[in-house]
């Protein structure tokens, strides 16, 4: 990794942690550190399962337990069995916790105003726009992509969402029985591979390959959740599928898509796929694409 890039990230981290008060034991002048304040805010009025809380914040379970114990000791949180499943623990705000969260919200607004206050109108707009871009890129960096058996819950979720979106967007809907299949066995090594993307342990995208020996391989089941769009995840999934294909000895990739999926068509063209004559009888296809791979790549 480029040393200047590393140094730039570290400078940014130092500036932000100091400016937002992350270094203070008493965040926003309250008698608790930033970690406890963040957990208190995330639990929210409805409460939150401890496991989901840990995944949202990417916290070690032991550290989160210590934060929750501190909040319980202060009478702000109670951790109890979930109403639906006694094996699941749920964190809920007490009445005092709800009041403290409201105070933190007000103080956070004041802190944000204090950052923006010394700046001109143009500088404020630039800062907030830059923060939005940083937020998107940091979120993108938190997405994990890996091989996933099609029978896993995360894979099933993505595939169901993929079919549901096609049914909504295609003229006349979508019936999987009329489409060329990509069965579980065809997306399982050595016949193929399914990649699933997760963000804070929640599935947010998928893409698959079907291998055909020495013939071109097929890209199938490309889908990104609406909540994860704009993060470059579609391009990342496609690039990782290409890397898997190249490592498998594939030299040509093919795919087909429907005219309703304009953003997918744009993605494929931008990634170097060229439109070719129809190479199959896919019922829902309007466009067929092909790309020749340069050679084996190292998988991330």
Image: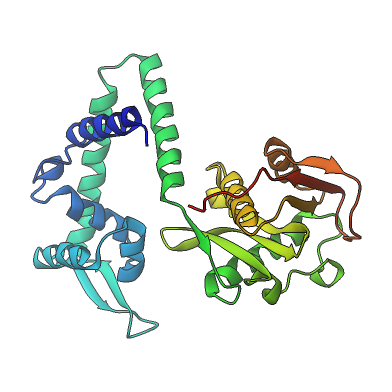
Is there any visible trace of residue 259 in the rendered image? no
Is there any visible trace of residue 222 in the rendered image? yes
Q: Quadrant of residue 17?
A: top left
Location of residue 275 with respect to 35 vertically, above or below? above
Residue occupying the point 31% across, 34% down:
6
Coloration of the structure image:
rainbow
User: How many marks are shown on the rendered structure?
Assistant: 0
Residue occupying the point 76% across, 54% down:
169
Q: Nearer the viewer, residue 266 or 279?
A: 279
Residue occupying the point 52% across, 50% down:
298
Q: Nearer the viewer, residue 78 or 168?
A: 168
Is 68 situated left or right of 6 in this image?
left
Is 183 situated left or right of 286 in this image?
left
Question: Split into 4 quadrants, where in the image is the N terminus?
Answer: top left
Q: Quadrant of residue 212?
A: bottom right
Question: Residue 26 in the image: x percent, y percent?
Answer: 9, 45
Residue occupying the point 20% across, 60% down:
97
Question: Residue 161 in the image: x percent, y percent?
Answer: 64, 64
Q: Nearer the viewer, residue 116 or 23?
A: 23
Question: Residue 237 in the image: x percent, y percent?
Answer: 59, 51
Question: Residue 210 in the image: x percent, y percent?
Answer: 72, 64
Location of residue 249 with respect to 291 vertically, above or below? below
Q: Nearer the viewer, residue 159 or 117?
A: 159
Location of residue 274 with respect to 33 vertically, above or below? above
Is 201 situated left or right of 216 in this image?
left
């Amino acid at each position: 990794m480029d040393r200047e890039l590393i140094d730039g990230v570290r400078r940014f981290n130092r500036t932000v942690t100091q400016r937002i008060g992350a270094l203070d034991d008493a965040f926003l002048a309250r008698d608790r550190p930033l970690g406890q304040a963040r957990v208190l805010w995330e639990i929210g009025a409805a409460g939150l399962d401890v496991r989901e809380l840990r995944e949202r914040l990417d916290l070690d379970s032991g550290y989160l337990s210590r934060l929750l114990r501190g909040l319980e000791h202060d009478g702000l949180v109670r951790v109890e069995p979930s109403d639906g499943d006694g094996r699941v623990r749920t964190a809920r705000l007490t009445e005092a916790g709800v009041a403290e969260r409201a105070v933190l919200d007000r103080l956070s607004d004041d802190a944000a105003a204090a950052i923006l206050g010394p700046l001109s109108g143009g500088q404020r707009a630039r800062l907030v726009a830059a923060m939005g871009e940083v937020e998107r890129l940091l979120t993108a960096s938190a997405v994990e992509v890996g091989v996933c058996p099609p029978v896993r819950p995360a894979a099933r979720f993505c595939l169901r969402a993929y079919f549901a979106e096609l049914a909504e967007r295609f003229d006349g809907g979508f019936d999987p029985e009329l489409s060329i299949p990509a069965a579980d066995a065809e997306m399982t090594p050595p016949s193929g591979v399914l990649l699933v993307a997760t963000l804070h342990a929640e599935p947010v995208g998928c893409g698959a390959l079907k291998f055909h020996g020495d013939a071109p391989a097929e890209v199938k089941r490309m889908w990104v959740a609406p909540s994860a769009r704009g993060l470059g995840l579609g391009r990342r999934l496609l690039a990782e599928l290409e890397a898997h294909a190249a490592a498998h000895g594939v030299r040509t990739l093919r795919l087909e898509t429907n005219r309703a999926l304009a953003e997918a068509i744009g993605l494929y063209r931008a990634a170097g796929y060229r439109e070719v004559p129809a190479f199959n009888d896919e019922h829902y296809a309007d466009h067929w694409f092909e790309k020749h791979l340069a050679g084996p790549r190292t998988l991330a």
